[in-house]
Amino acid sequence: LLFTATNKNASRSGYKIGIDKVSLSLSGGGIEGESYLPANGHPASPYYGYAISGGAVGAEYMAGYGASWSGNSQMTFTPTASGQTLSLTVPNDVWHDANFNSPVPTLRSNIVVITDTNFVTVNPFIPDAVVTMDAGSIWTVDSTTDVTSEMPVMNETIEIINIIHGTDSPEPAAAAIIRDGCYARFKFTGGSRLIKLESLEVGERDGSTSVMVGGTDEDIYFGGSGSTVIPAGTDVWSDWVANFVFDDQKSYLVEFDAKDNGIGNPGSLVSGIRSDGAMLSYSNGTLNGYSYVLSEIEGRFPSNGVFRSGIFDTQTANPSYGALNWTEVQDFPNGDVDIRVRAGDSSDLSDSSGWIAVGYFQANVANSISSLQAGRYLQYEALFTSAGTHESSAILRDVTASWTVPASVVDLIVDFGKGPDYGMVTVSVDGQEFIKGLEIDMEIYKVTSQSVTQRVAGVVEMYPLNSSQ
């Protein structure tokens, strides 16, 4: 696909060409312009290559320009004179999924689709839409309570058991675990007076009781100590509890003993309460609506996550599938992503014979999917895993699946950028120029005693000038 800078309008300052997205295939599946940078880098030859004669190529992040840009970015070609060219290798036919939003994904478990700004340091130096696993805050007291109060502690020990409600809770309105996680640490917040915490534990809740499921309880430490002092108005984080798993479909208990400072001055327990009366803790064995001292639970990446794409229409009956490739960043074996595919002739894949027999592909390039059911509709599923200390998640940047199509007429669709330094451009494929036809169809009547109708048809050739006229 050859782009040639031909001229520029007198009011323009340059010959620049901006390419947001290119489609030249029967399926109409588009290829992001920025996916051509670096050449053959998404992930390898022949996806996706380019060549230039004069000028330079680059990419621009367009999210701040107020228009709708696919992937929020575009490829740019900046010729220095007319006649300079940019050639793109456009495979026929592929599904290039780089934004992970069209078609809409059908499953996201422990997964987020985000704009990752870390890629601004590598070619083409722009943020990238990626799929990765989710880590961070698992639970906060602010998400489950709406009123804050304090309770004094003087010359006594109060046994506190905070309930961390999951979706299995008999009080679903109180469920506040927002993500799964492996490894966990706990933040405790002091009130207006110092408080001492001892004998801290976390474990899975056994049904609707104040008891932990056997074998799930783990001690919580602070710098290796089983107790800590929370100064007034101060947050204190625990050590990481290794390999402790939070599942948002389960409920948990965080248990500790609270004491004053032991020298005659009262301590205080900061607490939150729900206005709807949901039960949030046990205090000395009594079920109540308060959540004490614990203010946040943080988790690292879960052991696994699944991203299942939407279902793509290849527009081809009985396609002969070719290869599956994807672009990834991973810290194997601590973070990994593998992908499998399936196909079928029903738009919901209800007739699919199942996922390809080889299962999940582990390498990200040159995976043959020729044995895949020759169905018109295609879907992939990415399996993410995290191991070790669960501090790493793989990053999926784009996925390309290819198939062979019969010779046919296709439309060329190019989303061009526009600006004060942009010039005029012509486009050709394998040396053949495209023509945009405007068809004029008229009927001319001459009113006489014997009416005669003459029919005249004509075609006017048009090409884009990008001159705002």
Image: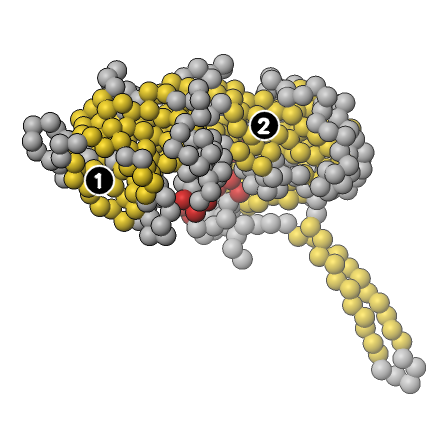
The quarter of the rendered structure image containing the N terminus is top right
Quarter of image, res 353 = top right
Residue toward you, 461 or 125: 125
Q: State the SS at label 2.
A: strand
Query: Which of pointers 1 and 2 lies earlier in the amino acid sequence?
Result: 1
Q: Position of residue 172 (x, y in %)?
A: 46, 44
Percent of width and height locating residue 265 = 8, 33
Q: Which residue is mark 2?
A: 382
- Name the residue: 73% across, 29% down: 354
For this orientation, the residue located farthest to the left is 264
Residues 253 and 223: in front is 253
Splitting the image into 4 quarters, where does residue 300 fall?
top left
Looking at the image, which residue is at 66% across and 39% down?
311
Could you tell me the amino acid type at mark 2?
Answer: Ala
Give neighbour class at mark 2: few <14, some 14-19, many 20+ (Cα, 10 Å): many
Q: Is residue 469 visible?
A: yes
Expressed as whole percent of the image width and height from the top left, the position of residue 237 reads 26, 27
Nearer the observer, 309 or 127:
309
Q: Is residue 203 left or right of residue 463?
A: left
Left or right: 371 with respect to 202?
right
At x 81% / y 34%, what residue is drawn? 318
Q: Position of residue 229 (x, y in %)?
A: 17, 26
- Identity of the amino acid at label 1? Val
Q: The C terminus appears in which quarter of the rendering?
A: bottom right
* Picture disc at residue 270: 1
CA separation in Å, label 1 and label 2: 43 Å
